[in-house]
Amino acid sequence: MVFNNSSRLTYNSPQETVQNAQIAIAIVTGDRASREIWLNQTTGAINGLKPNTTVMEFSTLTPSWCQELAREINQHNCNFLDAPVVGSRPQAEASQLIYLVGGQAYILNQQRPKFCI
């Protein structure tokens, strides 16, 4: 099950979660978990993305996986920002996380207000 904290909705898969999203955000424990939620053949979120969706990957991932994921996302006519966060629970609760964002500048500029929470 996937849980969306902002709307308190529960979905059965990452694919179902992103089907109506304009922005898809993931933060998981590493490459393996990220690959599973995005590229799983049956339930992967990439299969539910609509064109022009912006994907923001907040997980700390290896550069090679980020590059591969960015290519996959772009092949689905979507935008990708790699944005691992610095901080832990106290910083998150105080809205003081630091984002290390990589991606196309114009996409970042479009999404910049989402980083100011």
Image (cartoon, rainbow, N blue to C red):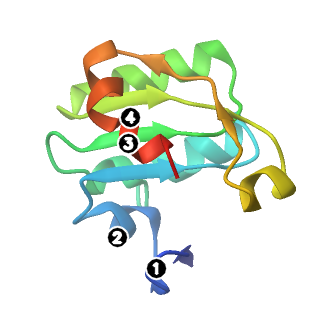
Q: At which x and y percent is residue 24?
A: 39, 51
Discs 4, 3 touching: Cβ within 8 Å: yes
Discs 2, 3 touching: Cβ within 8 Å: no
Q: At which x and y percent is residue 50?
A: 17, 50
Q: Which residue is mark 1?
A: 12
Q: Viewer-proximal residue, 72 or 80?
A: 80
Camera-side mark, 4 or 1: 4
As measured in the structure, the alpha-carbon distance from the residue carrying label 4 to the one carrying label 3 is: 4 Å
Q: Which numbered dot is residue 16?
A: 2
Q: In the figure, 13 relative to 79: above or below?
A: below
As measured in the structure, the alpha-carbon distance from the residue carrying label 4 to the one carrying label 1 is: 29 Å
Q: Which residue is mark 4?
A: 112
Q: In the figure, 38 relative to 13: above or below?
A: above
SS for dot 2: helix
Query: Which comes sooner in the sequence, label 2 or label 3?
Result: 2
Q: At which x and y percent is residue 99?
A: 62, 31
Query: Which comes sooner in the sequence, label 2 or label 4?
Result: 2
As measured in the structure, the alpha-carbon distance from the residue carrying label 2 to the one carrying label 3 is: 25 Å
Q: In the figure, 25 relative to 16: above or below?
A: above
Discs 1, 2 touching: Cβ within 8 Å: yes
Q: Amino acid at mark 1?
A: Asn
Discs 2, 4 touching: Cβ within 8 Å: no
Quadrant holding the N terminus: bottom right
Q: In the figure, 2 relative to 31: above or below?
A: below
Q: Which residue is mark 3?
A: 113
